[in-house]
Image (cartoon, rainbow, N blue to C red):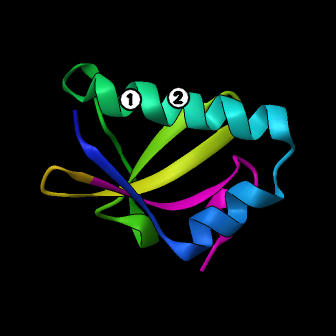
Amino acid sequence: MVKVTWTERALRDLEKLDTPIARRILARITWSSNNFERVIPEPLTGGFKGAFKLRIGDWRVVYTLEGKTVAIQFVGHRREIYKIK
């Protein structure tokens, strides 16, 4: 099990989502943190080098690893999340 932290940006992103989608994302993050040894991190490239993505349907969670802590950076739809600067 790893600790999960959220940036202000990620919390704002989550608050903007419809309740069922937000619950689905939170459930997946909770499951992933409890089963982290079974999750294979998907690394990102380019401007997001050093970050990883978690896929939840058409939604993405961009996070970084800081020791035994997962820091959630952004939450968004797959067509928009990688346009963040």
Residues shaded magenta:
70-85
Residue, disc 1: 32
Counting from the top left corner in percent of width and height, residue 16 is at 82, 59
Q: Are marks 2 and 1 in contact (CB under 8 Å)?
A: yes
The mark found on residue 28 in the picture is: 2
Q: Is residue 60 left or right of residue 32?
A: right
Q: Secondary structure at mark 1?
A: helix
Q: Residue at x 31, y 26 (%)?
A: 34
Q: Secondary structure at mark 2?
A: helix
Counting from the top left corner in percent of width and height, residue 32 is at 38, 29
Q: Amino acid at mark 1?
A: Ser
Counting from the top left corner in percent of width and height, residue 60 is at 60, 44
Q: Is residue 74 left or right of residue 22?
A: left
Q: Circle 2: is it few (<14), some (14-19), or many (20+) Cα within 10 Å? A: some
Screen quadrant of the C terminus: bottom right
Q: Is residue 80 left or right of residue 67?
A: right
Q: Amino acid at mark 2?
A: Arg
- Vertical position of residue 76 compared to residue 18: above or below: below
